[in-house]
Amino acid sequence: MKIRLILVLLLFFPLFVFAEELKPINLPAPNTKGGRPLMQALKERKSQREFSSKELPIQVLSDLLWAANGINRPEISHHTAPTSMNMQEIDIYVVKSDGAYLYDAENNDLIQIVSGDIRSLAGSQPFVKDAPLNLVYVADLSKMSRISIQEKDFYSATDTGFISQNVYLFCSSAGLATVVRGWVDKVALAKALKLRPNQKIILAQTIGYPK
Protein backbone atom coordinates (compact mmCIF):
# COMPACT_ATOMS: atom_id res chain seq x y z
CA MET A 1 0.00 0.00 0.00
CA LYS A 2 2.82 2.41 0.89
CA ILE A 3 4.62 1.70 -2.37
CA ARG A 4 1.45 2.39 -4.34
CA LEU A 5 0.99 5.71 -2.50
CA ILE A 6 4.56 6.77 -3.34
CA LEU A 7 4.05 5.91 -7.00
CA VAL A 8 0.86 7.98 -7.09
CA LEU A 9 2.65 10.97 -5.52
CA LEU A 10 5.48 10.74 -8.01
CA LEU A 11 3.00 10.57 -10.86
CA PHE A 12 0.94 13.60 -9.91
CA PHE A 13 3.59 15.86 -8.31
CA PRO A 14 6.74 17.08 -10.08
CA LEU A 15 10.00 15.83 -8.67
CA PHE A 16 11.13 19.33 -7.78
CA VAL A 17 8.47 19.47 -5.06
CA PHE A 18 10.58 17.00 -3.11
CA ALA A 19 13.89 18.64 -3.96
CA GLU A 20 15.69 21.13 -1.74
CA GLU A 21 14.50 24.63 -2.63
CA LEU A 22 17.30 27.17 -2.56
CA LYS A 23 16.32 30.83 -2.48
CA PRO A 24 18.71 33.75 -3.06
CA ILE A 25 18.43 36.85 -0.91
CA ASN A 26 18.53 40.23 -2.64
CA LEU A 27 20.22 42.57 -0.21
CA PRO A 28 19.27 46.25 0.01
CA ALA A 29 21.88 48.77 -1.05
CA PRO A 30 24.41 49.26 1.75
CA ASN A 31 24.08 52.37 3.86
CA THR A 32 27.57 53.87 3.79
CA LYS A 33 26.74 56.75 6.11
CA GLY A 34 26.36 56.78 9.86
CA GLY A 35 27.96 54.69 12.58
CA ARG A 36 30.57 55.71 15.12
CA PRO A 37 33.65 57.67 13.98
CA LEU A 38 36.66 55.56 12.99
CA MET A 39 38.83 56.53 15.97
CA GLN A 40 36.04 55.66 18.39
CA ALA A 41 35.45 52.34 16.61
CA LEU A 42 39.17 51.54 16.92
CA LYS A 43 39.14 52.46 20.59
CA GLU A 44 36.16 50.16 21.29
CA ARG A 45 37.16 47.25 19.03
CA LYS A 46 37.25 43.94 20.93
CA SER A 47 36.43 40.24 20.75
CA GLN A 48 33.23 39.06 22.44
CA ARG A 49 31.97 35.52 22.92
CA GLU A 50 28.45 36.06 24.25
CA PHE A 51 25.72 36.77 21.73
CA SER A 52 22.00 37.44 21.72
CA SER A 53 19.96 35.13 19.50
CA LYS A 54 18.30 38.20 17.92
CA GLU A 55 18.58 38.12 14.13
CA LEU A 56 20.36 40.92 12.31
CA PRO A 57 18.02 43.04 10.16
CA ILE A 58 18.68 42.61 6.46
CA GLN A 59 19.91 46.21 6.14
CA VAL A 60 22.50 45.62 8.86
CA LEU A 61 23.54 42.38 7.15
CA SER A 62 23.98 44.21 3.85
CA ASP A 63 26.02 46.98 5.51
CA LEU A 64 28.17 44.40 7.31
CA LEU A 65 29.00 42.40 4.20
CA TRP A 66 29.77 45.52 2.19
CA ALA A 67 32.11 46.69 4.94
CA ALA A 68 33.73 43.24 5.04
CA ASN A 69 34.56 42.98 1.35
CA GLY A 70 31.99 44.79 -0.75
CA ILE A 71 32.74 46.74 -3.89
CA ASN A 72 33.56 50.37 -3.12
CA ARG A 73 34.87 51.30 -6.58
CA PRO A 74 32.40 49.75 -9.03
CA GLU A 75 34.03 51.30 -12.08
CA ILE A 76 37.06 49.02 -11.56
CA SER A 77 35.42 46.29 -9.39
CA HIS A 78 37.71 46.91 -6.42
CA HIS A 79 36.76 46.08 -2.86
CA THR A 80 36.81 47.51 0.66
CA ALA A 81 39.54 45.01 1.62
CA PRO A 82 42.85 44.69 -0.28
CA THR A 83 44.19 41.44 -1.76
CA SER A 84 47.68 40.65 -2.97
CA MET A 85 48.04 41.31 -6.71
CA ASN A 86 44.29 42.04 -6.72
CA MET A 87 43.59 38.29 -6.84
CA GLN A 88 40.29 38.76 -4.96
CA GLU A 89 40.50 35.13 -3.91
CA ILE A 90 38.58 35.26 -0.62
CA ASP A 91 34.89 34.35 -0.71
CA ILE A 92 32.57 34.98 2.23
CA TYR A 93 30.09 32.26 3.13
CA VAL A 94 27.25 33.43 5.36
CA VAL A 95 25.88 30.83 7.78
CA LYS A 96 22.49 31.71 9.26
CA SER A 97 19.72 29.78 10.99
CA ASP A 98 17.89 29.22 7.69
CA GLY A 99 20.87 28.09 5.62
CA ALA A 100 24.27 28.93 4.20
CA TYR A 101 24.87 31.50 1.48
CA LEU A 102 27.68 32.81 -0.70
CA TYR A 103 28.05 36.60 -0.71
CA ASP A 104 27.99 37.94 -4.26
CA ALA A 105 29.55 41.38 -3.84
CA GLU A 106 29.13 42.39 -7.47
CA ASN A 107 25.35 41.94 -7.41
CA ASN A 108 24.89 42.52 -3.67
CA ASP A 109 23.13 39.18 -3.31
CA LEU A 110 23.32 36.12 -1.12
CA ILE A 111 23.33 32.91 -3.17
CA GLN A 112 21.91 30.08 -1.10
CA ILE A 113 24.13 27.01 -1.01
CA VAL A 114 22.42 24.96 1.69
CA SER A 115 19.01 25.15 3.33
CA GLY A 116 18.59 24.37 7.00
CA ASP A 117 20.60 25.22 10.08
CA ILE A 118 24.28 24.16 9.90
CA ARG A 119 25.60 26.72 12.40
CA SER A 120 26.84 23.92 14.67
CA LEU A 121 29.37 23.03 11.97
CA ALA A 122 30.73 26.58 11.77
CA GLY A 123 32.83 26.20 14.92
CA SER A 124 33.49 24.17 18.03
CA GLN A 125 32.75 26.76 20.72
CA PRO A 126 29.27 26.47 22.29
CA PHE A 127 28.17 30.00 21.32
CA VAL A 128 28.63 29.39 17.58
CA LYS A 129 25.49 27.30 17.07
CA ASP A 130 23.24 29.86 18.76
CA ALA A 131 24.65 33.14 17.44
CA PRO A 132 22.60 34.56 14.56
CA LEU A 133 25.46 34.82 12.07
CA ASN A 134 28.76 33.17 11.24
CA LEU A 135 30.96 34.25 8.35
CA VAL A 136 33.29 31.66 6.84
CA TYR A 137 36.27 32.96 4.85
CA VAL A 138 37.20 30.64 1.99
CA ALA A 139 40.18 31.01 -0.34
CA ASP A 140 39.57 30.09 -3.98
CA LEU A 141 43.01 28.69 -4.86
CA SER A 142 42.14 28.62 -8.57
CA LYS A 143 42.51 32.41 -8.52
CA MET A 144 46.06 32.12 -7.14
CA SER A 145 47.66 30.10 -9.93
CA ARG A 146 50.48 32.63 -10.45
CA ILE A 147 52.11 31.99 -7.07
CA SER A 148 53.62 29.07 -5.15
CA ILE A 149 51.84 26.90 -2.59
CA GLN A 150 53.66 28.64 0.27
CA GLU A 151 52.65 32.04 -1.07
CA LYS A 152 49.05 30.88 -1.43
CA ASP A 153 48.95 29.97 2.25
CA PHE A 154 50.54 33.29 3.26
CA TYR A 155 48.47 35.63 1.11
CA SER A 156 45.14 33.89 1.66
CA ALA A 157 45.76 34.29 5.40
CA THR A 158 46.78 37.94 5.21
CA ASP A 159 43.91 38.81 2.86
CA THR A 160 41.45 37.13 5.22
CA GLY A 161 42.91 39.20 8.04
CA PHE A 162 42.08 42.42 6.21
CA ILE A 163 38.46 41.32 5.78
CA SER A 164 38.01 40.14 9.35
CA GLN A 165 39.39 43.43 10.68
CA ASN A 166 36.90 45.32 8.50
CA VAL A 167 34.18 43.24 10.20
CA TYR A 168 35.61 44.05 13.64
CA LEU A 169 35.54 47.77 12.90
CA PHE A 170 32.03 47.65 11.46
CA CYS A 171 30.78 45.76 14.51
CA SER A 172 32.44 48.26 16.83
CA SER A 173 30.86 51.11 14.87
CA ALA A 174 27.41 49.51 14.76
CA GLY A 175 27.25 48.21 18.35
CA LEU A 176 27.56 44.53 17.41
CA ALA A 177 29.62 41.78 19.04
CA THR A 178 32.09 39.66 17.09
CA VAL A 179 35.00 37.26 17.43
CA VAL A 180 37.20 35.71 14.74
CA ARG A 181 37.88 31.99 15.15
CA GLY A 182 40.23 29.31 13.86
CA TRP A 183 38.76 26.43 15.86
CA VAL A 184 36.67 24.85 13.08
CA ASP A 185 36.31 21.30 11.77
CA LYS A 186 37.26 22.42 8.29
CA VAL A 187 36.66 19.02 6.66
CA ALA A 188 33.09 18.75 7.95
CA LEU A 189 32.28 22.38 7.22
CA ALA A 190 33.74 22.23 3.71
CA LYS A 191 31.54 19.22 2.98
CA ALA A 192 28.45 20.98 4.32
CA LEU A 193 29.21 24.09 2.22
CA LYS A 194 29.81 21.90 -0.87
CA LEU A 195 33.25 23.38 -1.43
CA ARG A 196 35.42 22.28 -4.33
CA PRO A 197 38.85 20.65 -3.73
CA ASN A 198 40.55 23.92 -4.74
CA GLN A 199 38.69 25.89 -2.06
CA LYS A 200 40.20 26.21 1.42
CA ILE A 201 38.58 27.44 4.63
CA ILE A 202 40.86 29.98 6.34
CA LEU A 203 38.90 31.38 9.31
CA ALA A 204 35.38 31.91 10.62
CA GLN A 205 33.86 34.87 12.44
CA THR A 206 30.78 35.04 14.65
CA ILE A 207 28.60 38.16 14.71
CA GLY A 208 25.51 39.20 16.63
CA TYR A 209 24.10 41.62 19.16
CA PRO A 210 25.80 41.57 22.57
CA LYS A 211 24.07 39.33 25.08
Image (cartoon, rainbow, N blue to C red):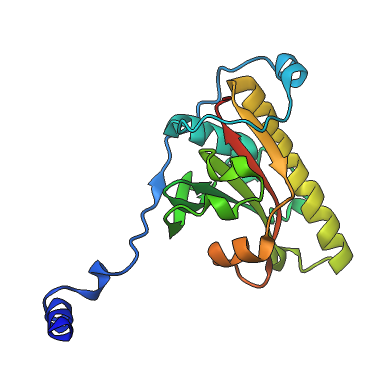
Query: Going by the image, does 25 lie left or right of 187?
Result: left
As drawn, is 97 to the left or to the right of 190?
Answer: left
With 112 as the anchor, is 64 left or right in this view? right
Q: Nearer the viewer, residue 114 or 159?
A: 114
In which quarter of the view is residue 82 placed? top right
Q: Residue at x 43, y 30 (%)?
A: 57
Tell me residue 132's x, y (percent).
51, 38
In x, y percent, where is residue 154?
A: 85, 55
- Location of residue 16 by image quarter: bottom left
Q: Is residue 167 visible?
A: no
Q: Is residue 69 above or below residue 151?
A: above
Q: Is 26 or 207 nearer to us in this picture?
A: 207
Q: Residue at x 76, y 48 (%)?
A: 159
Residue lying at 76% horizontally and 21% vertically, measured from the top left: 42
Quadrant for the C terminus, please: top right
**Spot occupied by residue 8 in the image (x, y as percentages of width and height):** 11, 80
